[in-house]
Image (cartoon, grey):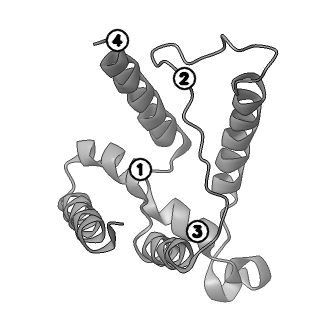
Amino acid sequence: MLKILYAAFSGALFAWGLVLSGMVQPAKVRGFLNLGGLFDPARFGPWDASLAFVMGGALLVTLVAFAVTPPNPQHPARKPWVAPAFQLPTRRDIDTRLVLGAALFGVGWGLVGYCPGPALASLLTGSPAVAVFVAAMLAGMALAKRFTAR
């Protein structure tokens, strides 16, 4: 039960941060991806740097978290609060599936302006467009799981 409470709190905190930073607004994301606005704002519209600051803040938090949390020989008892051990990724290779998945994610993010976290947080707005996006995202995840299972 404690695991579920921590997960719910973490998800709510993440959603609150997305809303507070404006990252649930697709126009902000598209404004960041509008690289033409860096060079010719009159033609392409302005470039919006706010997503870069959000990513930078997240990167700083992550760097601190990884610096203090990975298990090491000097601190074998260091572990997550509600799990027996850390589960850090072990794969380091870059394969075709990874590149194609990243490209598909990026294209979808650029076209629609949502990635999974902000889309789920945006469901609370009641927007039919967000509901359609989330339904399509879940269907895509199910199809990917079915056809790419190893």
Q: Residues within 10 Å of mark 3 (few under 14, many from 20)?
A: many
- Label 1 is placed on what type of residue? Pro
Numbered mark located on residue 85 in the image:
2
SS category of the residue bearing label 3: helix
Within the image, what quadrant is residue 36 found in?
A: bottom right
Residue type, numbered disc 4:
Leu
Cα distance between the residues tagged 1 and 4: 25 Å
* Classed neighbour count for the residue bearing mark 1: other residues with Cα under 10 Å, few (<14), some (14–19), many (≥20): many
Vertical order, 3 against 124 (above or below): above
User: Which percent across, then down, holds residue 108?
Assistant: 42, 74
- Residue picked out by circle 3: 31
Q: Earlier in the sequence, mark 3 or mark 2?
A: 3
Give SS at disc 4: helix
Q: Kindly identify the amino acid type of the residue bearing the numbered disc 2.
A: Ala
Point out the tag, 2 or 4, that comes first from the N-terminus.
4
The residue beneath circle 4 is 2
In terms of sequence position, does the residue under pointer 3 or pointer 4 come before the other? 4
Q: Are marks 3 and 4 in contact (CB under 8 Å)?
A: no
Q: Find the residue positioned furthest to the bottom.
A: 43
Q: Rounded to the nearest whole Å, what is the CA distance between mark 3 and mark 4?
A: 39 Å
Image check: 30 left or right of 4? right
Vertical position of residue 70 compared to residue 44: above or below: above
Left or right: 122 in relation to 55: left
